[in-house]
Every structure is written in structure tokens, then in C-alpha cells.
Amino acid sequence: MKNTLSILMVILFSHFSSAQSPNYDKLWQDVAKFEAEGLPKSALKVVENIEKIAKTNKNQAQTIKTMLFKSKFAIVLEEDAQLDIINDFKSNIATSEFPTKNILENVLANLYWQYYKQNRWKFYNRTQTTEKVDATDFRTWDLQTLFDETHLHFQNSLANGLMLQQEDLKQFAAILTEQKDSKIYRPTLFDFLNHTALEFYKTNETQITKPAYKFEVNNEKLLSDAKTFAELTITSKDSSSLQLQALKIYQNLTRFHLKDKSPFALADVNIERLKFVNEHATFNNKETLLLDALKAENKEHKKHEVSGLYDFEIAQIYYQQSNTYNSKTSNTYKWKAKEALEICDAVIAKFPKSNGAEKCEVLKAIINRTQLQLTSEAFLPVQQNGRIFVQYKNLNHLEFNAYKVTEKQFEKFLTLYNSDDQWDFIKPLKSTKTWESTLKNENDYQSHSTEVLLPKLDNGRYLLVATTKNASDKDFSFSNIQITNTALIETESPDFKIFQCIDRTNGAPIANASVELTYTENYTNKIKTEQHKTNSLGQFKINKKREHWYRNVKLKVESNNDLAYFGDYYINRSNTQNEEKTTYKSFLFTDRSIYRPSQTVYFKAIAIKRENNKSEVLENQNVLVYLYNVNGEKVKELQLKTNDFGSVAGDFILPNSGLNGAYYIEINAASNGINFRNTVDFSVEEYKRPKFETQFTPVTDTYKVNDLVKITGKALAYAGSNITDAKVVYTVKRKVRYPSWYYWYRPYFSSEAQEITHGETKTNDKGEFEISFKAQPDQSIDKSSLPIFNYEITADVTDLNGETRSATTVVNVGYHALIANIMVNPILDKTKKNNQISINTQNLNGSFVDAKGYIKIYKLNAPDFVLRTRPWNAPDYQNFTFENFKTLFPHDAFQDEDDSKNWKKGDLVFQKDFNTKTAKTLELGNIKKWKSGQYIIVLESEDKFGQTVKDEARTTLFSDTDKTLADNQLLSVSANKNRYDIGDKAVITFASSAKNINLTVSIEKDEKIIKTEIIQLNNNKKSITIPVTENDLGGFTVNYSFAVYNSYQSGSVFISVPFPKTNLDIETITFRDKLQPGTEENWQFKIKGPKGEKVSAEILASMYDASLDQFNYHSWYFSPIQNSTYRTRTYSQANSSFGNSQFRVYNSYTNVRYPVQYYDQLDWFGFNFGRQHRNISIRGMSSMAKKRSGSVSGVHVVEDRIEAPEMMMEESEMSSLDDTVVVGYGTQKEVNNTEASTEKPKEIDFDDVQIRKNLQETAFFFPQLKTDKDGNISFNFNTPEALTKWKLQLLAHTKTLESSTRTLTTVTQKELMVSPNAPRFLRQGDVISISTKISNLTDQVLSGQAKLILTDALTGKEINGALGITEADKTFNVNAAGNTQVSWQLNVPDNIQAVQYKIVAKAGDYSDGEQNALPVLSNRMLVTETLPMWVRSNETKTFVLDKLKNNNSSTLKNHKLTLEVTSNPAWYAVQALPYLMEYPYECNEQTFSRYYANALASHIANSNPRIQEVFNQWKNSDALLSNLEKNEDLKSILIQETPWLRDAQSETEQKKRIALLFDLNKMNNELQSAVNKLDANQMPNGAWSWFKGGRENRYITQHIITGFGHLKQLSVADANEKTAEMVSKAIQFLDAEFIQEYKDIRKYDKNMDLDLDHLSYTQLHYLYMRSFFPNIKKSKEVEEIISYYQTQIEKYWLSRSLYAKGLMSLISHRNDAPIMATKILKSLKETSITSEELGMYWKANTNSWFWYQAPIETQALLIEAFSEIENDTETIDNLKIWLLKNKQTNRWKTTKSTTDAVYALLLQGSDWLSVTDAVEIVLGGQKIEPSKLENVKVEAGTGYYKTSWNTAEIKPEMGDVSISKKGAGIAWGSLYWQYFEDLDKITSAETPLQLKKKLFLKTNTDTGEKITEITEQTALNVGDLVRVRIELKSDRAMEFIHMKDMRAAGFEPVNVISAYKWQDGLGYYESTKDASTNFFFDYLPKGVYVFEYDLRVNNSGNMSNGITTIQSMYAPEFSSHSEGVRVLVD
């Protein structure tokens, strides 16, 4: 009430003040006050009043401001707000005048731009339309259209430039965020609008396809001085280029400000322009030109302070150049930082108070800033020198201290996190050693590095601390090191963790060392201790356990007066697997990988067993074979027994209905003790067999950029004929790809595609075509990065008879054209004479290119010392002399000579020219006299354009006679052979140039270490010999490790012992690669063993149509003998004993920032036009479930003759005509057609023409052929009559599983061939052409006649005349090896259901004919119009089904009118009650969720005795069926034909399980069992882990205790002693965690501001949890922290999510902060939307990945908050309406949160379940009384009933429906009108679910693909690509949406493979049928979506395209359909 009065006072005051001079500031303060309290509706009322005043006073700035505020509030308070806001701005622009119009245009452009940035992912997959599809709804536009519209409005905003230049920006202060000094630089509205537009034009959008002539910044004058730039003429053909528009704006601004008296504004825009051009320029010398331009401008204004700005830019470039300095590779810019400093000093001296001077001061500070990084080795030997690696800048001196600390002190130090505590710890320590170091400083302001001596130290731990002179306590660096001679090596094996103590200087094992091991077991915190002694190898073992693991493992090692500490280690559980002695496996093979429905799948399976490492077939085993469909439903099964070769074979006939997609066959043993389960997947799709394929020829020519590239391709029929005179439409696009190394230091990015060319050509007489294009490079790409440009060429080839096949290839072109590689063995035995080098030269496309060049080989100069690997890179300033360094560190590299990559070339030992045209290898010849050691091989060549190409490789020479290791290398390990046979001896040689080093060598076989020994080397070689036995097949490893000179190395040598070969050889005896159709063949093959011997084998032979591989490639994999190569299971490492230690550096320098000149910006006042973020998840394949076998499609869309289904051909039944649909679908059903066959043609006698009818796709499948005594097999078959390529597959195996596979191809062809291209179906009323291609494979021209004979497939009568065929005979002439085409036009009548066609052709002695059948679909269909209805409590509403009421169609025929009414849908909430099942291995969270959900659900179910009473009545009705299974007669498709059968079954099962909730004894036992389980799993500290035995988990614990508290709050469960104890213990743990997180706020920063937002969701959730337990005492500390977080709530509540606000309101209410609680609820009310139908809800309440943003949970929580705090029934009921309406269209999951939602619906607010009054329905003026209607039952509880009227009873007035409800709650219903209508006369219809469909013609343009809407004037041609574009709109979230898109008979789908896909934010399953494509959306969120897919024009004619329908399968009253259209194809 007070709030209302305050608003009234504001409005009254404003009216009073407006009569005088309006006080806008005061009014806006009131708006701000309401906003601060989260009250947008109150604020909006004030804004609307301000708007009236502003318009009255013609205050344009204030009017614009009110528009922005209204828009901001609309985003929160209105659905479709974005669309309304845009339209509002458009209407205001239309009525506004200059300059307001300009500002509004600018705002509108920005709104579009904001929307794009928030939704860019939606636009990327939308195709550009030539015109706007929807002039008003920008949400449906494509990317280019949105950019064009944005560009248009920005250009409009810049109109009347001269006038804008006169407009002072000050007059628009009310809508600006004003910045200091901004108006000096941008004083006018002209500046403001132009710079705002620049933000758009400067963007670099990579997803827009650029034309070949794209605008490039390639004119050097663009980087000139302002005057020169202003006079330039900037033009481009690419007028849409954003960069072009940006430059024009810069030019306009420059011209304007050149007239200024003061140069400030000019300098500002000029510098910005120069930077922009420099960023995008494509010329190479842009940095030089930029500096010249800056210097010129500096000179021009040298007496003015703006010259300092130009000087600063010059200095900054110098400084950037200085950063490229590298002491080893680049010295050019070493002194540039110093030059920059001098420039800065000059500017500061000349203009000390200028902006330029201020910037120069910052740059000076950056250049002068000190930098320091320090590194030491983490471990050093006792009393040995060490070094500290120092990287520094601008430092002269360092002081070091070494402090020896005890282990206790060290562990305490590790717990300190901030610098103050650390320094306080260090300060009192006594220094063990102190030393200083002077750092070389040349004042070049560069970073340098050096090494500082670390003096010898005694055994122990040390803190090393470094400080600079005069440093404060804030400036210090520290690290810790350990001085010890002991190193600890850890070795992992499956059963043990082995620790080894060795000497870190020479690797000698330390025996008898005392080791104290401490650890914690599993996730307990109890520390355990063990004592161990090392053995003679220095080792001790820890046995791994299967159930235990060890954390925080630390070791204390004492030996020989040396003490060392190591840790922290982790010992995992034992992972040794108990191997089964006998294992089983099976293999499955099918005849192909894709089938049509009702075809036969042939299969063979082979079962094997492996025992004692030997494999053999499994004989006489009973097996079960199952066929499963897409929904995972078992369709059929077979019981079989394996033969003596372990195989079974059989077949399945596929169902003729159901969902298309991935089926699978499963096989397993029929007995329990054997398991060899295996599956094979295959596709079941309604495809059309391809007749030809298109391929590109591999690119062998060499090209570089700007060359004319020629690409050739070929179209070849599968039957072997060339595809001549075919249309080829092609496009060429370019993308840039960098070498892989380019991304090492850069983020990965993709470049925009650029259209290079597009066009059309034809195939020649050989079926070949050629595409030429210029390989234009992208000039903006730096050549030095060696980019490779990918030119993607796509060709669509359309054959003479209309079939289209596509191919794509990529040509790589770069600035270089040749890649040369050297390949050489890394180790060469110089005593052998067959050593050689291989040379590979190829172009960028991987094709061989011959090249000439030379090879040079140099010996590398090795160091004179044995060196370890340097611990860090060599410094650029070395403090030591070489001699001094080598004295101190004899085995360390002085520079970088430890790495052989840095060794210098020595003597040239070999030089020879090569020519890869004649030889690709070079023989090295006799190299015996070459020195042993490393060599570098250098190759140099040139590509054909003269560009140098180089490559290098390295190799090492050795000889067995070498006594020592060459090149002073540390270690070499080699084996005497690459592979070994049984009986061989493996000799492993270890060699070292070092003296006195010890290697630990272990031999590992069968995952066990069988021997370990120490090998000592002393500048010599030693070998070990290992006999190779039969057990070593597969190989074994020799592992080694050693330490030397305080460094560590380990490795392993694999000893290869290959298994014997088991491959059979399949030899061809008789086979033909060309066949005549319909002839008998006999083929023979011979099977030989691995050594050529005779074998007894079983063979699987199968042959199928190879064209099907275009859809799903088919191959057989059979590898029964798994002889795996051995892999080591033992790994050694010493990371915790060696390595470097980085110093923690604290530096107290002040962080400086450049002064930024901010500019006046439009103040959006918090208005953000982008979308609310919403993540949409799609349900995976697991949601597909079983299908009911043998069912037929639903009747949402069927034909007129529903009364006589046997006489019609439904689209859904077409798959049952798999043999008669189109060419090549399978074996044909032959019709006895005597009438057609006896008719004699006049010109030519066709009687003797062989008609091909057997068009099957599998020629044969012989699964169990056996070899004869000689190993031969033969088989006979009749060749199929389909003309195509066939793929023969052979698989042979023996009983001992030697095996082999082989693939061959053959073709069936004739000299004269007819290839009809018939459509998949005909539709009544269509005019359509059937064409056939006639191919001539002879070498002569043929002339003859072709004839079409049509018969009725049901009666066998000829019907040529009935289909308008007046000339059945057509003459033809066809060239030698050529093709021609003849066609017939059919007029499809209304009285034929199926047509059999026969096409024959004859020319002299050559003839051919093909017969097939086509179904005829009706042009009429059953349409279902739906009208959803709803009514609230005590309300009457009237609804009108306009189409029924106003129907005047003469062809429309009524079928049925159905009325559905639900009087009390609140009972559906009862049906949603979940009962959560118990699952094995469930985690604690699942255990509790089950307890919570079942306890609450049981409480709800038993809260009202009527619930059980009603449920018992439901059990005997359909009430407990899933909504997905109900109302099949009103749905567009059966549930069995969707991916949602499993969802339906799951929901039905959930509903039936509700009965368990009424069994109180069972429930109490289960609940107590769950409590006992939770009690057992609770850890001693009160926490729960995720899974038992895991780590304590605060989230899980908090979740469980919150649930217990919630049940207590709802009076569901009384806390017994056990739960009370659990809760008490857990709260102690959670209190401690709560305190710790609070303390951690200042863990790293003592001065962290506690007033900042520190309220994490974890802490907020704790507060909510703790609010349930006020009786459990809180400590004073907890109380104080809770008070702190309550203040956090009060400060930051407004910015949190809805869920969080609900929690905060309840927390505040329970913590005695009622004002805060009320404040939050008040805000929630004002941010909500209240809809008459949907109730009260929040627009922001949408799905998200975040747990705190889930709509159902959030709404339930808010109901709880409103109920507990305010208990206003009206508000609560409004909130409940939204929940119930959500349930109407969504299946609620069986989860804990669903229980909360049901509780909110049933036990909060009004008692809706008690309402029993039925709603009153008046239909067409007649009251409906269900009790008096026949066969109508009213469902208990819900009051649901359904009644219908048949054809004669339906009247137009029945379109009027009145619905009245008495009592609380809501009711809903729906009216379904079903009628038959001609497809072309169906008009569109929509409900809250809306659909718009349009067809577009795709064309290629200079800027990529564009689509143009197809209208009556559009000329479509065969081969064109048609893009279907569908817009979907829904005002609410819905699940289980089915969309069916019909298509014209002359269209062919591009995609035929069913799969889950993603588009425009929607996940869906797509399945192609013969006459339509089905789309299944698991979840359709509220919003607007654009959906596209492609069709190809296949036949000419005038055809009906049908309609598109969409319907909710869960709530079928929500549906929509498009209008019927016709398409005309020339």
C-alpha cells in the first residue's frame, strides 16, 4: 500500500512540475530508487510519466532516455520484448526529425549489433537469403542480412553530415555517459555518431564469405599524413566491406577536423586511423610507413602539445621493437628502448603537463621497471658447488642468504601463504652463508640472464633468500633446496611401488639405508609410520593392495651420515587383473551395411575361444542371435548352433515400419558360463540407389599462388559407362591454413571462407570435366608464416536423366611449391656397405614431384667433456670464465654444447648430387673410415619457380669394434638385432664415456621384473645376454635408470619377438570383372596357408552393390588371433629427487597504467539487448526405445480413402513396397501382365528384349563354403540384373584361426543400357516426367527406339492412355561410347494406386529393358486442426476454431471432431510422483536423494485419503499410460516410429510405481535402510564422500543435511536418534568448512576488502541448510560469520539468480531479518510476468548447466518462499499454474526435485485436489454432458474425458466453444477437427506452437551461397538444389516434438542417413522417408528457431509439394502446419 501511495505521489508531483519546468533529475532519482530495490514495474510507471512530460515539452534527449529505460524493463517483463523494442524504435524513427532521427538510427543499428554478438552461433549455419524472409522479425534473418541492416541504419545515422557537424553534443547530455575532456576530441554529434559506427565497422567478422575481389588495405597512401589521407579516393567493387566503410568514416572525420583551429581532435582521430590501417594493411613495409607518418605529423605540429602524442606513439613502437631483442638470434633492436626513453624525456621536458607527457611518464616507468626471476637446482650434493640462474632487468646487485632449517621449521613455512608472514618467518633466522653478486647492466633496458655461484653447503634443508640493495620488506625472493648425496628413485609396477636409494653423483645403490615411511591410508587423516631397510640394490618394496591406497607418502632416509627427506608420493591400488584362463569372443558379418525396410539381412558369425594363449574355433555351441531396432527393441531372435568351424549363419527380414536409423544384430552364447557377446551395426534407410559417382583426379601438378590451377574430375556410371554431356556446377572457396608450428604461441583460429570463383561446365565424351581458377592468395596473411591456402572445389554433376552426384576436393597452394624430406636411420653401422639415404620430394598436395639438388654430410664437433643436460638455458651474460667454470662444474655445459642440436659442423665427409626423377635413394658406400659419432645431413634443392628448399637430418655412426662411446656421450643403449626369433640371444650393450657410473638394469617379462642388476661403466662398454624362449613371443623389455653428476635418466629397450604369421592367401583361379546381367557364373578360388601349404578352410563369399558404399561403407574386420606387442608395465622416475626450484619473487613496484582518454558514450542505463543465456541439451541415443512390431502410421496426415485402406497407398506404407518403390530397391514382385506383353509395337518388335526385373542389391551370400582336399572352392550364381558395380568380399578361416580377407570388384553391363531415373513415388494430380538415359558401350553410332509401357500394378491393365502417354515410342540416336536421354510426361490421375513401368530400348541387335513399380500417393490428406483451451478458477472463456467456423472449401470433407476436457489437471501432479528405485553401487548423494524423494512422495501420497482412492480407480484405466502413448488417433505418428518409445515406457512405469508409495510398511523399511546406509557411510569427522571410501565432500554433505532439514521443515519425517546424531556430526563438519572458507578470503591477501562480494553459492547454500536447524547451537564464530554473510545478502542480493534470491529470502526470514525477506519477495513480484494462461513466472527462469538455474526446482523453491514468508494464496496459486502448465507439455523426470515440485503443487496454496466440480462445456450452442454420452468415461480425479463427432454430425457452428470452471485451480481442454483436403488447398494453421515453411533455390554468388524464395515465377531446373527453410516459434518449453516435412515427387533428399544433429541451438533426430523427412526434437525451448535442409530437383513437372506439420507428442493439442504449395520444374 505504501509503495502504491509513493508512486501516486511521484506521478502527482511530476504532473504539477510539468506545468512549470520539469525537474527531470528528481524524477529519474525516483526511478533509480525503485531500480535499486529491484522494482522494475514501479520504476516503469514513473518512466512512462516522464515520457509524457518529455514529449509535451519536446525534450528529445529525455524522450530517447525513456525509450531506453522502457526497453530495459521490457526485456525482463515482456515475452518477445526484443521484437517489440525494435518495432518501437522503427516507429519512432519514422515520426522523428533531425537530429533525433539520426540518434535513433544509431541506437537501432547498435541493437541489431548487440543481438548478433549475443546470438552469433545461431547465424553461422543460416544461408544468406537474397531478400528478407520476414521484414519485421529480425530473429529469423541470416548473418549477411543482419549485417546489411546494421550497416543501413548506421549509414542513416550519418546522413546530413554538415548539419551534424553543427550540433553540439552538450545538448544530449541526458543520454550520455560523459567523460572528462571528451568534447575536446569529439565535440559534435557528427563525431559521436561516426565513432559509434566505427565500433561496428572495425570488427573482424570471420564467418561472412568474402568475394574474390574483397577489399584489402593495400594502398600505402592510406598510411600517410592526415592531409594526404583526406584527399585520397577510396573505392572498391566490394562495397559491403566493413574495412572500406571504416576508412571512409575516418576520412570524413579527418576532413572535418582539418578545419579545426586546435589540432586536438584531429590528432586523436588521426592516430586512431593510423593504428587501424597498420593493423589491417597487407603491404610489408607498414611499420616504416607508420613511423614516417607519425614523424611527419610530429613535425607539422611541433610547437603544439599534440606533437607529444605523436612522439609517444613513436616511442611506443620503438619499445615494442626492443621487445623483439634476443641475445642469440636478433640484436637489431637492442637499444630501441633507450631511444624510446630519450623521446619520452624530451616530451616531458617540452610539454610537461600535456597528455603526451603523461603517457610518456608511464612508458618510462615500464621501461625502467625492474624484473627478477631466480632458479636453482632443488637438490645438490653435499659440499659441492651449485649455481643460481638469474634473469633480470634494470638490476645491478643481489644479496643472497642461505638459512638452514629443521624439517619442523620447513613444514611450518609451507603453511604460510602471504609475503608478510613469510618474511616474518625468515627475518629471525640465522644465516648459514651470505654472499653477493654484481649484475652486468649496460643500461639497454633489456632482460638478461646470468649465473651466480651457490657456495658449498653441508647436508640439510635450506631456505635461499635473495634481496636487492636497500630493498624493503616487500622486496625479496626465496626458494628451498636440500643438500644431500642421496637420491630416491620410484618405480611403479602392477603389484609394487619400489623405492631405490642411490648416490646422486654416480648412481651407486645405497644399501642398508634406514627409511622411515609415513602416510595416510585411503581418505582417512590418520598418519601411519613404517620402518624399512634397503637391500643390496638400494631398494625396498611396498606391496600394493586392491582395496587400499596411500596418500601423503613421505620418506626420511638416513645413511652414511646423510639425512634426506622425500615426498609427497602417492601409492595407488593394485591393478593386477585376475586373468580368465579361457576367454571367448565372436565376430559378426553382414552382407552389407545399409538396407531398406523389409529387405533381408544375411549374417554370419564365428565364435572362438582362447585357452593357454592359443586360439581356436568354438564348435557345437548353442548361440542366440537377436535383431534390435533403432529404439533398442528386440525385433526377432534365432537359436543356432556352431559348426565344426565355429560358425553360424542366418538371415532376418527387416520390419517394414518403424523408425529408420541404426539397427544392430547381437550374438551371444545360449549357456550361462560362456560370454562372447558381440554386435554389428547397420543402417535401415529409405534410400535410392546411385547410378554413378563423381570423383576428382589427384592433383599431381605443382602450383604456387597466383598460378592458374586446373583440376580435372570424372563422372562414371557404376555400370562402367562414361557420364557424358552432364551439367557440372562448381564452386571454389579458399581458406588459409598455417603450419602446425604457427599455433605453438598463438591461439587457434579459423579464417573466413573466401569465394574464388563459381561456374558451370559439362562433361566430355569420356565423362571428364575441367575446372580452372586463379590461386589468389590472401594478401593480408604474412608470407613469412608460410601459409598454405586451401582451395576447396565442389562439383555437382547432373546426368542427362536428372540424377545428381557431388564430389569435393582440396588443392593446397602456397608461396612455396616443394617439400623435400630426408629419411635416414638414426643409427648406422659404418661397417656395413648398404647404408643409404632416402629422399622424398612432393608438392603441397602430397603428390610426388621430381627435383634436383645436392646432399652434404658433415661430422659434428662434439664437446671435449662428458656433460649432463644443462638444468636451464645458458645465460647471455656469463659471470665465469671458461676455465673457472670447468674447474667448478666439469660436467656442465659452459654454453649449450650439451645439446647436439647446437654442435657446429665439422669436416665435410660426403657430397653428392641427386635427382629424384631417376632415384629416390642415395647409397653412402664404404663409410668404414668415417669417425664414429654424430653427423648432420643437409639437403638443398629448388622448386620449379626457383625457390630454395632445404631439409636436415641427423644420424649417428658406430661400429662394434669401438672400445668407447664416441663424442663423449653420457650413455648409449643398443640391442644387437631389431627382432629376434625363439632360440636367439638378445645382447644389450650399455656404453658410456663417463667414469664410474652405475646403472640399475631390470629385465621385465610378462608384467614382472625377473631380474635386476647393477652395471658399472667406466668409459667403456658392457653387455648383458638374454636367451629368447617360446614364452617371450610378443617381446619383453629391458629397463634401465641411473644418476650421474646430480642428474637422472631412465629408459627401456623393447626386445621384439614377433609371433609367427597366420595370414592365409586367397588366390584367384576363375573370376570375371565384367558380367552380363542374368547369366550363370562359376567362380573358383584357392586357399593357401601362411607358407603356401594346403589348408582346410571355411569361406564366406558375398557380393553386393558397391554403389551403396556412398551411403555407408561396408567392410569386414576379422582378426581372431590377438598377438599384442608387449608393453612395459614398469615405470621409473625421480621427479621428487631432481629438478629445479623456482624462487618465489616479491617485487613492490607500483603497477602503472597508461592514461586512457574515455569518450562520451551513449548511456544504455543498464539496457542489454542480448538474450538471456540458455543452454539447451539434447537427449542422446539412449532415449530411443522399443517399438511395437507390425504397427502402422498414425492418421494425422493420410489420404482421403481412409474407409478402404487396402485400396490406397499411404506414404507411411511405402516402405512395405520395398521391392516396388523405385529402381534397385530389391527383388521385384512380378505381376502377371499378359495384356502388356502381347501388345505389338508398330515400328520395332520389342518381344525379344530381355527385361531386367531382378534388381536385388545382394547378389549372393554364401556363408559356409568349404575347401576341397586341394584347398579349392567354387560356387555358382546367377548374375543380378541391376546394371552396377559389385563388390565381392571373401573371408577364409581355418579351425586354428589362420585367416584372410579379400575384396574384388566387377560390373554388370550391356552394350546398350537403359537407366531410368524414376521418382520414388507419384502423386495424384501431378504432371511429372520420367526419363531414361540410354548408354552405348559399343564403338559405333546406334539408332533405335525406346518405349514406355505403363500398367496398373494391382489389375495388370495397361494404362498409358490414363496417364496421358500418347507417344509411348521414342526414337533415339546415341554416339559410340556415348549417352542420350528420352523422357515421357505423365499426368497422374486420381483413380490409380500403383503403377508398374517398363522401359525398353532396341537398336539393331542390341537391346535392354528394365521393369519396376511406383506407388501413387493421394493428393488428399487428413489434416488435424487443433485448438488448445484453458480456463481459470470461477471463470468462463470462449474459444473459436476459425477454420471450422468459416470453412467454405468445396473439396474439403469432414472426418471427425474430437473434444478433450480435463476438469482438474492438478491430479496430473499426483501422476508425476516419483518412486526412486535402489541401484547397486549407488553413491551417497543417490542414496539420500532416493530417501528424500520417496519419503516426501509417500508423505504426499498419503496426505489425502482420496489420492489412494483415485489411484486405485486409475489402475484399471488408461490414466497411468504415458502421455506419449495416449491419443494415437490424434497424433501425426505412432510412438513406435519415434525415438521416444523408451521415454514413454519409462513414464508409464513411473506412474505404476506410485502404488508402492501407499505401502507404508515397505516404505518405512526402505527409508530406514537408506538411513542405515548413510549412517554407515558417514566419516568420523561427520562428512560424507561421494562414494564410500572416497575423499570427504562438502557439497555432498551439505546437500544431504539440507534435505534432512527440508523434510523436517515440511513435517515429513521426524528426526529419530540416528538421523539426529548424523545431522549433528555433519553440521560440526560443515560449520568448520564454513569458517574455513570465510578465512580463506584473506588466505593470500591479508588486506582483502571484506566489503566486496564474497558470497559464494557454497556459502549461501550453507546458510540455507543451517536455517533449518536453529536448535543446534552455533559457536560465537559461526554466529559472527553468519551475520557477516547476512550483510553480504543485503548488499548483493539484487545481482543474483532467481534460485539464489529464493534461498536468500528464506535465509533472511529464518534469521530474523524480515525486512530483507519482504524486500526480496517484493522485487520477485515486480520482476515476474503474470499471464492469464500461464500464471506467474519469471522470464529468466530457463534451463542452464548450473544447478541453481533449473526451472522446475526454481519455481518450487519460490513457491516455498512465498508460502512460508507471506502465505498469500492468490500469489501461490498463480505460481502453481505455471508449474502445472509446464507439466502439460513436459515429462517431469523421476528425480528428487520433481518431488519438491509436486509438493509445491499439491500441498501449498489452495487445495486443488478437493475440487470435484466438472467444467461446463458449450459446443456450438449445445451443452456437453459427458454422463449422458455413449462410451464416454470420466476419469477419476482429473475429470478427463474425450468425445467425438463423425462426418455427418460436424457443423460450422461447432467451431465455437465455451468453457466454465467453478472452484479453485485451472482446467484445460482441446478441440481437434480432422478433415480431408487437397494438398494444394490446405491453408496454414498455428497454435502456441507455430511453423512457417518456404522453399528456396540455392545459387552460388561472388559472396558464397545465396538462396532465393521459390515463387510461381521461379524457373527450377533438374539438378537444382532446393533449400527448405522452416521457422519454428514456441511460447513455452515443450518436449517430444515431431515435425514432418512432405516433399514433391520430383525432389530427392540430399541426406538419407538418420542421425542426431544440431542446428540453430536445437538438437534433433532426422530420419528420411520416401515421401517426407521426419524431425524429432527431444526438447524445444521457448523461442524462435530457423531450420534448413536440402533437396535436389530430380524430375521435371508440375507437382504438389505437400505440407509441413509439427505437433507435440506429449500434448497433441499443440500443433501447426504450413500451407500446401505446388512446384514447377522445367
Image (spheres, helix red, strand yellow):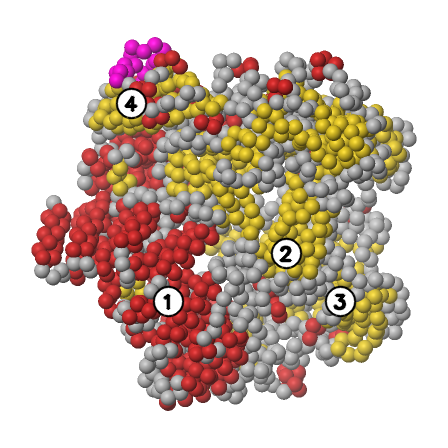
Q: Do the residues labelled 1 and 4 touch (CB within 8 Å)?
A: no
Q: Which amino acid does label 1 sit on?
A: His
| Circle nearer the N terminus (1, 4) | 1
Q: Assess disc 3: are there few (<14), some (14-19) or many (≥20) residues with their C-alpha within 10 Å of its C-alpha.
A: some
For residue 33, say whether it is visible: no
Give the class, few, some or many, for how many residues have Cα within 10 Å of label 4's Cα (few <14, many ≥20): some
x then y, percent, for residue 666: 63, 29
Question: Could you tell me how far apart the alpha carbons at marks 1 and 3 are, in whole angstroms?
Answer: 50 Å
Is 447 or 703 nearer to us in this picture? 703
Specify the amino acid type for callout 4. Answer: Asp
Q: Where is residue 1102 in the image (x, y as percent from the top left)?
A: 76, 30
Secondary structure of the residue carrying tag 2 is strand
For the residues labelled 2 and 3, the Cα–Cα distance comes to 21 Å
Residue at (65, 60) in percent of width and height? 774
For marks 1 and 3 on the same chain, the one whose residue lies earlier in the sequence: 1
Residue that carries the numbered disc 2 in the rendered image: 791
Highlighted magenta segment, given as a residue range = 1821-1839
Question: Which residue carries the number 3 mark?
Answer: 944
Residue assigned mark 1: 195
Position in image of residue 541 (x %, y %): 62, 55
- Residue assigned mark 4: 1856
Q: Distance between the residues labelled 4 and 3?
A: 83 Å
